[in-house]
Amino acid sequence: MSTLQNELRAQAVKLFDDIKTLTFDGVGVTRESYGAGVDVTVKHLVDFAALHGIETSFDGAANLVFSLPGSGDTPALWSGSHLDSLPQSGNYDGLAGVIAGVLCLVRLKREGRVLSRPFKVIGFVGEESVWFGKGYTGSSAMWGKLKPEDLALASRNSGRTLGQCLQEAGADMARISAGQPVVDLRDFAGYIELHIEQGPVMVQRGWPTAVVSGIRGSRRHPKVLGSVAIGRCGENSLDGPTHYCPVK
Ligand SMILES: [Zn+2]
């Protein structure tokens, strides 16, 4: 491993440790969407990026964007993940994808490499469904996919509505309320995400990493139909780690 790779590895470990310390709740980490845990994580990553010459900005849905200076608006390859977490959650879920992308930017800058198209990284601030009872709020706001009833959902912690939270975070409420994207769709040439989820399949097969070409949509309902899980093997699992199989 090169000196730079060793340095980046040490920076990754320190970022994970520092953000874990900042958001530790006594059991795991808690990074509430549009709340204290996400805010302190965003600030820490913005400071880190500034230290390494990486530019940061917020899109019209208050998601955090990292890019190299002079990237411009030509269609970019994007990476990233979510910055929010479940309560008492694992430190790596979501955060790993953001830190991996940011350190790729640091490496590109340090090596002076110019890619054929810009590489940008996004940290979504509201993806877990636990905070508003609806998942993917950050990315949905970005693409103009939030309905009025979604914006009226109240945070389980603060009681503020999603619309209020987005507004206070500086989001473009005119476009979001009108169901319009807050980003230029032509800026996106592709998206790749490193993600860590809990699941038995890779462990059982001894795979350290794996690639998926797609991911199922996730929809959660407060009502339970008897004791039957729909489309799963009776498990309440996450978005990708468990294979589909006949419903039990
Ligand atoms: Zn996740």
Image: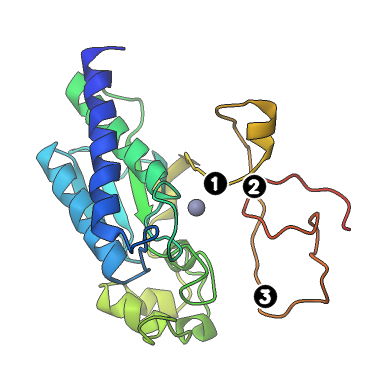
The C terminus lies in which quarter of the figure? bottom right
Q: Is mark 3 within 8 Å of ligand 1?
A: no
Question: Do residues under tags 3 and 1 come within 8 Å of each other at their CB atoms?
Answer: no
Q: Is residue 192 left or right of residue 31?
A: right
Question: Do residues under tags 2 and 1 come within 8 Å of each other at their CB atoms?
Answer: yes
Label placed on residue 169: none
Q: 10 Å neighbourhood of mark 2: few (<14), some, or many (≥20)?
A: some
Residue under the image location 14 percent in, 36 percent down: 52
In x, y percent, where is residue 132? 48, 77
- The answer to which image quadrant residue 100 occupies is top left
Q: Is residue 50 left or right of residue 88?
A: left
Q: SS class of the residue under badge 1?
A: loop
How many marks are shown on the rendered structure? 3
Residue under the image location 81 percent in, 58 percent down: 231
Residue to which mark 2 is pinned: 240
Label placed on residue 221: 3
Q: Nearer the viewer's eye, disc 2 or disc 1?
A: 1
Furthest residue toward left:
51
Q: Which callout, 3 or 1, points at the residue further toward the start of the chain?
A: 1
Mark 2 and mark 1: Cα distance apart in space: 8 Å
Does residue 126 sit above or below 120 in this rendering?
below
Q: 10 Å neighbourhood of mark 1: few (<14), some, or many (≥20)?
A: some
Mark 3 and mark 1: Cα distance apart in space: 21 Å
Mark 2 and mark 3: Cα distance apart in space: 18 Å
- The answer to which image quadrant residue 27 occupies is bottom left
